[in-house]
Image (cartoon, rainbow, N blue to C red):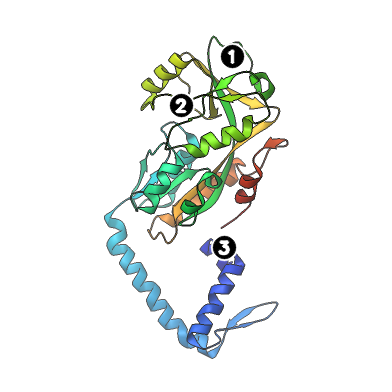
Amino acid sequence: RAAARLYVAQQALSRDVRRLERELGAELFVRTTRQVTLTADGERLLPHARRVLQAQDDLLAAFGQARPLLVDLNSPGLVTGRQVLERARELAPGHELMARYESGLTYAAGELLAGRVDASFGRFAGLAPALRTGLDHQPVRYEPMAVVLPEHHPLAPLPEVPLAALAGETVYAGAGNPRTPEWTDLAHRLFEGRGIEVASPVPLAVGEEEFRRIMDKAGHPVLAVVSFPAMASTVVRPLVDPVPLSPVSLVWRKGLVHPAFDALRRAASQVAAENGWLRRPAGGWIPDADAAVMCVRN
């Protein structure tokens, strides 16, 4: 129960307790298969530990309220991060949680490590190893992927688009965008062996109007997720056979301390459970590396 409250694995908590016991040169707990109780040394440590925790609470009260928790939602209109943020605001009404829009997790990771953003959402396995070492994550959702089609496209009348129907197509997946290489990598993995090409880089468009103009000019379908906001003269169609999944985690820098951060993590857990976001659909496609990362529960 203690490990669950701290959002760490039970083994990690036990390891930290043993490390503390070695540093103090004292055994703090008597452990049996049925219960854990404090030793005499543990009882002696307890009031000191409580004072340390109270000092931390006082420090957070003095400084944590001075600034909002900055949460990157990638892009306006995407619902996963938005729903988590809205729930966190309900759980922590006394704190300010503000949205940011950094477009992609790779770019946001640099902002996280620099302390300019506190949390973000995205494909954790798609980050470079050097970035992941300074970050931590909590799986939130397997989001089904979709394709955005011009309304005059031959596949637009279909309610769902089989992946095989995209054979021979060139699909835009953010190639060349330095903020979103994790998304382009996911597209390459999905399209490999299916006869689907990733579109060459196009000028980086900022804002829906510019994005729609560039996409109209290029004429390519766009790889997206099912919650991608509709744009004029386009349709969003889920991909099937198989259903490709975009793995979404809540991501933050290791050691983050903020009085509203616990509420954000609890919100992510609650919203994911209520919506069944971490249940993989039968036949769902996801790279093995992502599946391994998404099975980790911090």
Q: Residues within 10 Å of mark 1 (few under 14, many from 20)?
A: some
Q: Residues within 10 Å of mark 3 (few under 14, many from 20)?
A: few
Measured Cα–Cα span from mark 1 to mark 3: 46 Å
> In the visual, does 265 lie left or right of 29?
left
> In the visual, does 234 lie left or right of 291?
left
> In the visual, does 150 lie left or right of 116?
right
Indicate the secondary structure of the residue bearing disc 2. loop
Q: Are marks 3 and 2 in contact (CB under 8 Å)?
A: no
Indicate the secondary structure of the residue bearing disc 3. helix
Indicate the secondary structure of the residue bearing disc 1. loop
* Above or below, 53 relative to 70: below
Q: Are marks 1 and 3 in contact (CB under 8 Å)?
A: no
Which three-letter amino acid code belongs to the residue tagged 2? Pro
| Nearer-N-terminus badge (1/2) | 1
Q: Nearer the viewer, residue 38 or 200?
A: 200
Residue 296 visible in the current orientation? yes
Residue lying at 46% horizontally and 26% vertically, measured from the top left: 201
Which three-letter amino acid code belongs to the residue tagged 3? Ala
Q: Residue 31's spot in the image, x, y percent?
A: 64, 81
> In the visual, does 163 lie left or right of 13?
right
Q: Residue 296's spot in the image, x, y percent?
A: 61, 54
Q: Which mark is residue 201?
A: 2
Residue lying at 47% horizontally and 88% vertically, measured from the top left: 44
Residue lying at 42% horizontally and 77% vertically, measured from the top left: 50
Q: Residue 257's spot in the image, x, y percent?
A: 39, 61
Kindly report which numbered mark, 1 or 3, lies closer to the viewer in this rendering.
1
Residue lying at 53% horizontally and 84% vertically, measured from the top left: 22
* Above or below, 49 relative to 201: below
Q: Which mark is residue 4?
A: 3
Pointer 1 residue: 156
Kindly report which numbered mark, 3 or 2, lies closer to the viewer in this rendering.
2
